Amino acid sequence: MSARRSPYAVVHDIDGPKVRLGVLWFAVSMGAAALARPALAIVMAIAAAAAADQLVRIHDSPGSLRDVLTHPARLIAMLGAASMPLAAAAGSDTLAAAGAATTILAVVGSGGRAPVVVLAALPVGLAAASPVLVHRLGTAAALFLLLLVAAYDAGDFIVGTGAGTSWEGPAAGIAAVAVVGFGTTVIAPPPLVEEGSATLAILVAMLAPLGPPVASVLVGDGATKARFVRRLDSLLLCGPMTAYVLAALLPSLSA
């Protein structure tokens, strides 16, 4: 008898070129982070907009991307989620203002669908904004965050696909973070140095496994296909917490 799985445990979607798309996402996000903060903000804004639109379509407004202009809830969710990584490039105060503006616009303009729009836009928008906030502390900090999250996702996907229990994938992801995290503490470039790199790795190892189940709650369950949401799910908790902790750990660099 197979072990009972939680309804929010992720059932990995293996249809299509998932490995190649994952590698492409990793390359694009890492390349943008290495290039400049505005480039990273644009890449993460596109990802946030796609994820927010997918959540609204799952719960409220089905249809293709071409129909987005005829569904105010979808348009507001996309614009609100995309605005948050772009605002994060200017700082946490601007990010907070973008989140507040998104909430107000959802209440005023979404035709009674404000709860759906807010729950779609704000979590993925904040997750996507987190690497941009971390980038303000230094390029290496953002690169290491993205690298560690990618290591977790790779371990979780490779082992978790077809696993008989829901814990095997996350355990493999944590192990991958431990291996990659050890390497980052050895390199430890400024501004992280050894303490910052170790803190970053510990936060990702602790919080990245909680992101996919939270995304499953947003989607409705762990089996529904939501490839755009899943691009950001590991960042839902570890992204904001990492940005907060690193800013507190490196106060001289957070201004």
Image: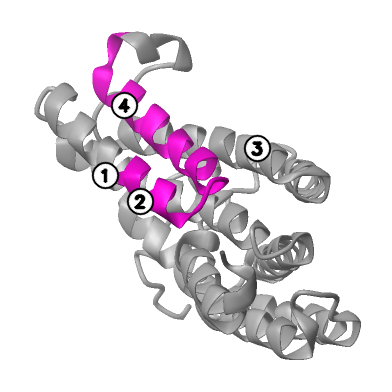
Helix, strand or loop: magenta stretch: helix
* Amino acid at pointer 3: Val
Q: Report if residue 153 is visible in the image.
A: yes
Q: Is residue 81 left or right of residue 220?
A: right
**Other-residue count near label 1 (Cα within 10 Å), few / some / many at <14 / 14–19 / ≥20:** some
Report the Cα–Cα distance between label 4 and label 2: 17 Å
Is residue 166 shown to the viewer in this render?
no
Residue 232 spot, x, y in % from top left: 54, 52
Mark 3: secondary structure:
helix
Residue to which mark 4 is pinned: 76
Q: Position of residue 32 (x, y in %)?
A: 77, 43
Q: Is 192 one of the magenta-colored residues? A: no
Disc 2 or disc 3, which is closer to the eye?
Answer: 2
Q: Is residue 194 left or right of residue 7?
A: right
Q: Disc 4 to disc 3, how far (Cα)?
A: 19 Å
Of mark 2 and mark 3, the one earlier in the sequence is 3
Give the secondary structure at mark 2: helix
Residue hosting label 2: 96
The Cα–Cα distance between marks 2 and 3, rounded to whole angstroms, is: 20 Å
Q: Amino acid at mark 2?
A: Ala
Residue placed most toward the observer, 210 or 191? 191
Name the residue that disc number 1 marks: 100
In the image, which residues are magenta? 70-99
How many residues crowd around disc 4 within 10 Å: few (fewer than 14), some, or many (20 or more)?
A: many
Q: Which residue matches tag 3?
A: 43
The residue that appears at 37% across and 71% down in the rendered structure is 6
What is the C-alpha distance between the residues marked 1 and 2? 6 Å
Give the foreground label among 4 and 2: 2
Q: Residue at x 44, y 53 (%)?
A: 126
